[in-house]
């Protein structure tokens, strides 16, 4: 289903099955990205459901055991199965990434669209506000919010929403400014269609390419921030665990049992690489289309 | 130009003011008092709070804080009374800068080099390898890079020291782990911009004129492709500052990042506020300088603003 989003509005008839096949054959990098991401999501959803071990169940008799047939990623210092734990954490990381990217995406599109369409003074004021908010590193907001509201997925998402929407808003504003001067938008205006309808039905669908690219890049950014904070010990609080938390826990004995750190790191990196692959290839497709 | 400069400076100051307000009120909203350690009685906590002026109404505290801030006074550390926040910053910023500035330079040099190579290399394998490696490196969190480098070079191979900053060799791992991500981003930016430039008419003309490839790339195309890199320096400095939180804690380096992480675990409110405002000011400053530099170096932008003013 997620594949559907990548079909841009401007694309000609090649829709449906054939369009998909052509997309996957012509763009191997994107295809690899989507497959990696799909497998990754499947594992993150299925492993916690099907695994005989729970992510938090401790078992003192099998502490720090190396990867084996019964424990694919081995166990940690409390005897918890790392395979189940890593994929549980992966799910949580993905959730934080998706929710905050979704929220930031919505805020950004709304803000940028209003700013670009209103123009003049309103546009200037809105963009200056965005300048001021974005002048400060986003990480500082997130840290302050987690300190106020306590560590947890909720405060991280809220913190990310303070400054995370600005790139999206700028991009959407630029697109709207460009599109609203074009003939079809003028025509719609002259027909007396309400501004809201022009914006939602005529302008935004034409900006869907850049919006999708930016949305895809918002996800790894959010996952990055969450892992970073959890690694510092101010992110996701126990007993919940994200990939960052698991990496942090493995740090105290990384000299002795490096595998405990390498597995969650690998899982995290695969995710990042997959999302980056998809994003970059979409970006290039967009650029090619605008050049033609 | 003057108007643009003034406008940018004003935006910077406003941003700093907003940051100071936000930090102040968020820190006041934090649950618990910094002096409640469990073993201390109510009266003592109240007495200490009175001493620090924490019993006053919020607006009054805010005015005092802002007044002190204007005079460059960030207060004293709650955890370690007697130590001024400005002294802590004065002690630690050099250390962090001694990692961050080389990391930034390394990232720009490496990023530009690989970016040029990616855009103009005639070998497909070189171009593809650079973009693939760049994509993977941009996907690895900074702390992961630091840990992997540490595991590989100091634990497994025992080639480089793992902690502290005693000799130049100590700098290699932290600086590299800070520089990896910005270098990957700069590679992408330079590569994309240069690729676009190389397709333009003036490059074709230069080639028709018989100019050498190197000459075209370095004196013509690169001059027009540096803009995105300059714009990225601001965000990169923000990344390096936040990256120093983990890199300094992994390599046990007594810089601003580690001080900040400690202040968070200790709930040392004045130190948190002071360091946040300081780091925000650094990033705002870098953004301001690169913006002005960009506008000043770009003839098109400069002319537009001159006409606007005149």
Image (cartoon, grey):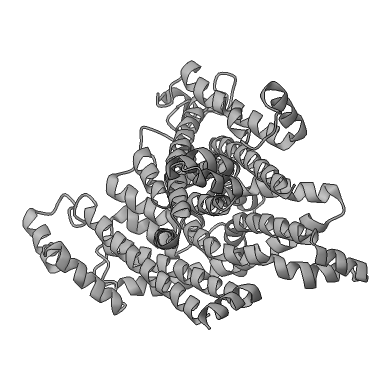
Residue beneath the point at 59% across and 19% down = A69
Vertical placement of residue B8 versus B131, above or below: below
Rendered location of residue B291, percent (x, y): 54, 71
State the residue lying farthest toward the left. B43
For the point 57% across and 69% down, the residue is B101
Q: Residue at x 58, y 27 (%)?
A: A67
Q: Residue furthest front?
A: A191
Along the line of sight, the residue nearer the viewer: A165 or A174: A174
- How many numbered discs, if any? 0
Q: A115 and B171: which one is in front?
A: A115
- At 69% across and 42% down in the image, what residue appears? A285
User: Residue A31's spot in the image, x, y percent?
Assistant: 69, 32
Q: Is residue B134 above or below residue A269?
A: below
Extreme residue in the bottom direction:
B310
Residue B177: in sight, yes or no?
Answer: yes
Looking at the image, can residue A252 be seen? no
- Horizontal side of residue B134 vs B309, given as left or right: right
Question: Which residue occupies the foreground of this view, A272 or B262?
Answer: A272
Q: Is residue A205 above or below residue B244?
A: above
Residue B134 placed where, x, y %? 68, 50
Q: Residue A44, position in %: x, y?
A: 52, 26
Instruction: Pick whichever, B173 or A146, lies toward us.
Output: A146
């Amino acid at each position: 289903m997620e594949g559907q989003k990548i079909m841009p509005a401007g694309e000609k008839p090649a829709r449906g099955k054939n369009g998909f096949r052509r997309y996957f054959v012509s763009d191997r990098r994107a295809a690899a990205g989507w497959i990696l991401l799909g497998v990754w999501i499947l594992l993150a959803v299925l492993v916690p459901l099907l695994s005989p071990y729970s992510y938090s169940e401790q078992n003192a008799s099998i502490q720090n055991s190396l990867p084996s047939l019964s424990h694919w990623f081995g166990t940690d210092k409390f005897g918890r199965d790392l395979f189940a734990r890593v994929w549980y954490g992966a799910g949580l990381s993905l959730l934080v990434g998706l929710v905050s990217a979704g929220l930031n995406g919505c805020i950004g599109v709304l803000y940028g669209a209003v700013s670009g369409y209103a123009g003049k003074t309103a546009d200037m004021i809105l963009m200056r506000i965005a300048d001021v908010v974005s002048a400060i590193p986003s990480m500082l907001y997130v840290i302050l919010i987690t300190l106020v509201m306590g560590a947890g997925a909720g405060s991280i998402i809220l913190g990310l929403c303070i400054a995370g929407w600005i790139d999206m808003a700028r991009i959407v504003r630029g697109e709207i400014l460009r599109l609203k001067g074009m003939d079809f938008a003028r025509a719609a205006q002259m027909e007396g269609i309400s501004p809201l309808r022009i914006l939602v039905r005529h302008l935004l669908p034409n900006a869907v390419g850049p919006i999708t690219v930016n949305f895809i890049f918002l996800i790894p950014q959010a996952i990055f921030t969450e892992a970073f904070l959890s690694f510092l010990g101010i992110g996701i609080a126990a007993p919940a665990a994200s990939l960052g938390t698991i990496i942090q826990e493995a740090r105290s004995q990384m000299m002795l049992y490096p595998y405990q750190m390498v597995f969650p790191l690998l899982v995290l990196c695969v995710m990042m690489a997959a999302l980056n692959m998809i994003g970059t290839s979409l970006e290039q497709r967009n650029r090619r289309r605008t050049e033609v | 130009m003057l108007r643009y400069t003034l406008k940018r400076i004003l935006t910077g100051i406003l941003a700093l003011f907003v940051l100071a307000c936000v930090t102040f009120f968020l820190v006041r909203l934090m649950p618990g008092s910094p002096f409640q350690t469990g073993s201390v009685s109510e009266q003592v906590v109240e007495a200490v709070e009175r001493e620090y002026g924490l019993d006053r109404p919020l607006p009054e505290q805010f005015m005092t804080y802002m007044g002190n801030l204007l005079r460059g006074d960030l207060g004293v550390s709650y955890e370690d009374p007697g130590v001024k926040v400005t002294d802590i910053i004065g002690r630690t910023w050099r250390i962090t800068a001694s990692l961050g500035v080389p990391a930034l330079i390394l990232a720009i040099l490496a990023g530009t080099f690989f970016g040029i190579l990616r855009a103009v290399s005639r070998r497909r394998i070189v171009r593809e390898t650079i973009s693939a490696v760049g994509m993977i490196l941009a996907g690895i969190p900074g702390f992961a890079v630091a840990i992997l480098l540490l595991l590989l070079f100091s634990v497994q191979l025992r080639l480089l020291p793992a902690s502290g900053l005693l000799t130049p060799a100590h700098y290699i791992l932290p600086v590299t782990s800070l520089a990896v991500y910005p270098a990957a981003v700069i590679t992408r930016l330079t590569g994309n911009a240069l690729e676009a430039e190389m397709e333009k008419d003036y490059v074709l003309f230069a080639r028709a004129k018989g100019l050498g490839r190197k000459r075209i790339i370095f004196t013509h195309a690169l001059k027009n492709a540096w803009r995105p890199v300059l714009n990225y320096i601001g965000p990169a400095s923000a990344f390096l500052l936040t990256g120093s939180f983990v890199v300094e804690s992994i390599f046990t380096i007594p810089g601003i990042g580690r001080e900040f992480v400690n202040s968070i675990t200790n709930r040392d409110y004045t130190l948190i506020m002071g360091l946040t405002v300081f780091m925000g000011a650094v990033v705002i400053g870098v953004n301001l300088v690169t913006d002005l530099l960009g506008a000043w170096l770009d003839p098109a932008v400069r002319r537009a603003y001159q006409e606007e003013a005149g």
